[in-house]
Image (cartoon, grey):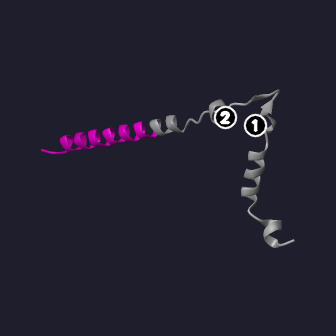
Amino acid sequence: MSRKDKFGNSRAARQQERMAEPSGTGTDSIGGATLPPRRKIHPSSISKVTKWYYNLLFLLFVCLVGGLFWYGLKFSD
């Protein structure tokens, strides 16, 4: 057996095996019904975290500008 036959592209071989299987016999089926994608069951909260992060940065920037104006008005003649 050649090395290519023994250790060939395993990803391509698995894809061909999956394509050969009927759609109802996969590992994600229970009683003939397929399960929904994981992304729909467990949605990511990265967009919420990103929104909070940018809002916090904006608030800190506004506080910095306000503080600098206050400092400039208080200590200037």
Q: For the stretch drawn in magenta, what is the main secondary structure?
A: helix
Tell me the residue that label 2 is attached to.
37
Closer to us: 17 or 39: 17
Q: CA distance from mark 1 to mark 2?
A: 15 Å
Closer to us: 60 or 8: 8
Q: Quadrant of the C terminus?
A: top left
Q: Amino acid at mark 2?
A: Pro
Q: Residue at x 27, y 42 (%)?
A: 65
Q: Residue at x 33, y 39 (%)?
A: 63
Closer to us: 27 or 55: 27
Q: Residues within 10 Å of mark 1 (few under 14, many from 20)?
A: few
Residues at circles 1 and 2 in contact by the CB criterion of under 8 Å: no
**Kind of element beneath mark 1:** helix
* Residue 8 among those drawn in magenta: no
The image's mark for residue 23 is: 1
Where is 45 relative to 15, above or below? above
Where is 21 relative to 31, above or below? below
Q: Residue at x 76, y 56 (%)?
A: 13
Chain part drawn in magenta? 53-77
